[in-house]
Image (tube, grey):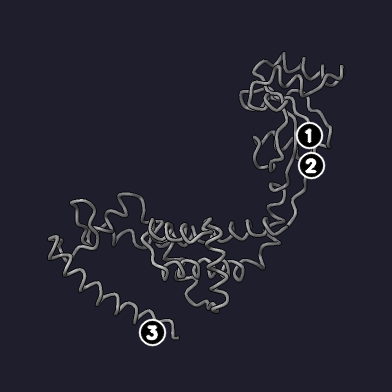
Amino acid sequence: MNRSSAQDSGQDSGATSGATSGATSGATSGQDPSSVLRIGDRELAPADVMPLLQRYGMLPALVKEIVIDQAIAALAISPEQLTQALEQFLQANQVTTPEQRQAFLTQRCLTEADLAALAERAHKLQQYKAETWGPKVESHFLQRKASLDRVLYSLIRTRDGGLAQELYFRIQDDGQPFADLARQHSEGQEAQTGGLIGPVELSVPHPTLGRMLSISQPGQLWPPTRVGEWFVVVRLEKFLPARLDEPTRQRLLDELFNAWLTQQVQAALKENASPIAS
């Protein structure tokens, strides 16, 4: 079936049904037929919507969804793909039983047709990401790899520089266990794990600490170093280089897409700022 014809037909049917039920409801409840939404004793007219979106900071979210709709409008999906997309959408939202499905629809005021449309949209969006930015993922990965590499390390932090120096020598020269000293003397959450942190990406620790770890060899112990308000003693335990596996590929696709989407939304908001304000 032609998609636009189906939509037009649905809209005509919806308009007819809506007009009939709206007239009946309006006559019964006294609701203004020109209002688009009634919440409690407040009726919202079309002219009220835009100021409220701006007041509550929701306009960027609306623009984002419209930009996405425009981007994926030309993409096609087969009935088989739609069936698969619906299954994936339900799984992603942890909807596994008929009861959960009905509750999902009820809580969101959705019909089965709305549910299918949401699943189709999610599938098309993923397809759009892959087709548009898939060829760029490998180069983006190479640019980001240094911050995606992960490290497992041990840390002792204290505000006492003299104590930090003493602990360093007790580990380095006396061979005392790092974990024991961390539990006794470290002043951060890592004391609970014997100083062990990670694995975490190199972009997670303080930049100074990240640079130290990035040039360390496993087992290398650093003397006390000032990092912000702390004196830290740190030892790299394990270096885990990033790989372009499927989760990382998807993450990078999302990064590229979101950077583009942010630009599009900001441009649209800027373009419409003056007319909306007036």
Instruction: State the CA–CA distance, disc 3 to disc 2.
Output: 58 Å
Which residue is label 1 attached to? 236
User: Disc 1 residue type?
Assistant: Leu
The location of residue 20, given as percent across then percent down, is: 20, 74
Is label 1 in a helix, a strand or a loop?
A: strand
Quarter of the image that includes the N terminus: bottom left
Instruction: State the CA–CA distance, disc 1 to disc 2.
Output: 8 Å
As drawn, 108 above or below 164: below
Residue at figure coordinates x 34%, y 62% from the top left: 272
Compare marks 3 and 2 and give the one earlier in the sequence. Answer: 3
As drawn, 144 above or below 183: below
Which residue is label 2 attached to? 239
Q: Residues within 10 Å of mark 3 (few under 14, many from 20)?
A: few
- Mark 3 or 1, closer to the camera: 3
User: Disc 3 residue type?
Assistant: Ser
Are the residues at dot 1 and dot 2 in contact (C-beta closer than 8 Å)?
yes
Q: Can residue 10 be seen in this snapshot?
A: yes
User: Disc 2 residue type?
Assistant: Phe
The location of residue 3, given as percent across then percent down, is: 43, 82
Is 218 in front, or is 78? 78
Left or right: 82 as drawn, with respect to 154: left
